[in-house]
Structure formats: C-alpha cells, structure tokens
Amino acid sequence: MCMDSEMTNSYDHKPGKKIGILGGTFDPIHTAHLIIAEAARDAFSLDEVLLMPSGHSYLKDDRAQKVLPPEIRFEMARLAAEDNPHFTASDFEILREGNTYTSETLRALRELHPEDRLYFIVGADSVRSILTWKDPCVIFENCTLLAAIREDGVPTEEFLKAVDSLRSDYAADIHILEIIHYLVPEKVERYIIETGIYR
C-alpha cells in the first residue's frame, strides 16, 4: 500500500496538457520506442510525448559495455523525434546530477506542472520489475502507467497478472498498449554510421 508523498524540473509547453513520457537509456533509440510512443499518443489523445533519455542509469551503468554519454543518446532521441510534431526529445533527466530515478523525475514534473496529466509509458518487463525501482509508490501517485506489451516480450498471462497485482495492491492506474517488434530509425542509423559511436 502506498502512503502519501510530497511532490517535487522543465519542459517547454502550454499548461493543462496530457503529457506522455517515454524514458530509457535509448542506446540507441529504436523504432519500437517510437511505435510505442505513437500508440500511446493515439490511444489516449496525448498532446505531446517526451522522449527522455536517462542520465546516470544506476541499473545499466555498471555493465561491461558502458552506456553511451547522455549527450549522444539525447541527440539520437532528438533526431528520432524530428519528423513527428507530437514528439519532443527531453534533456530533463540528463541535466540532473546523480542517478536517474523515475520516481524523482515524475515528482519533479508534477511539482513544476501540477495542471498537467502525466502518462508514463513502460514496457511489460518494467511492469514486472517496477516494485524493485526506487519509491514505486511515488510513481503510481504521480502518473498513469501505459504498459506496452509486444508479441515478442513478457508472456501475456504473466504480464496481466502483474498489472492486476499493481492495480489491487497499490491502486496503480495502469492501461495496456499492444505493440510490435522494431528496427532502428533511418536518421538514427545514419547518425550511428557517420559518428562511428559503436565501433
């Protein structure tokens, strides 16, 4: 059960919007990310979707293959967002110091823009593991979760069980999106080839 928590940075917009947030390391950003973002925007009439690369990812920065610098990942997100007027690449997390925590991001956005409705877009695997994240109750209290399930992802029965559990145990507002497999967007592919960042 979640207890009440206090709320706590900035994206450029008009007040009172329905804002989708798709976060991730984006190393690199894939077409699947864009498909998920567009599916969420369409299904829930979102005014805007923020493509938000993580800053210091405490879950991934200790891997043998290090995550690329945030400035590069942000540039790939910016390129990926360029052709969709409803997408905005956001440097909200990469400008903050320390580890990146979804709960702190959502709390900060809610405090800065209390008139907006926030929709945090996640994959089925994140739904399954979200209780291991920092302050999951803060996440549930500050947004609606849009959970994308792909045909190649977490087994549907397991995913739906996790959704039901979060709804009943934490009063999490979760809605389901059905998504498909992915490739790297053309502009991002060109950027990767031209910069040689994975060589």
Image (tube, rainbow, N blue to C red):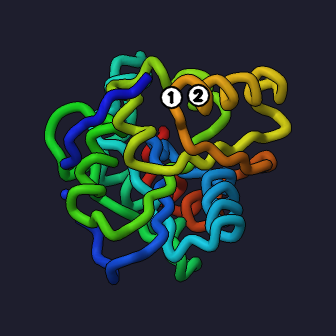
Residue at the image position 28 percent from the left and 56 percent from the top: 109
Image quarter (top left, top right, bottom left or bottom right) of the N terminus: top left
69 sits to left or right of 143: left
- From this view, report whether residue 144 is shown above or below residue 10: above
State the image quarter where residue 2 is shown: top left
Q: Can you give x and y, in whole percent of width and height, for residue 164 in the image?
A: 69, 28
Q: Which mark is residue 108?
A: none
| Residue linked to disc 1 | 170
Which of the pair 17/31 is nearer the observer? 17
Q: Secondary structure at mark 2?
A: helix
Which of the pair 196/156 is nearer the observer? 156
For the residues labelled 2 and 1, the Cα–Cα distance comes to: 5 Å
101 sits to left or right of 165: left
Q: Can you give x and y, in whole percent of width and height, for residue 35 in the image?
A: 69, 59
| Residue linked to disc 2 | 166
- From this view, report whether residue 12 is shown above or below residue 73: below
Evaluate if marks 2 and 1 touch, with contact meaning CB atoms under 8 Å apart: yes
Residue at the image position 39 percent from the left and 31 percent from the top: 137
Q: Secondary structure at mark 1?
A: helix
Residue at the image position 34 percent from the left and 31 percent from the top: 57
Q: Can you give x and y, in whole percent of width and height, for residue 170 in the image?
A: 50, 28
Q: Can you give x and y, in whole percent of width and height, for residue 126 in the image?
A: 57, 31
Tag 2: residue type?
Leu
State the image quarter where residue 165 is shown: top right
Pointer 1: residues within 10 angstroms few (<14), some, or many (20+)?
A: some
Tag 1: residue type?
Tyr
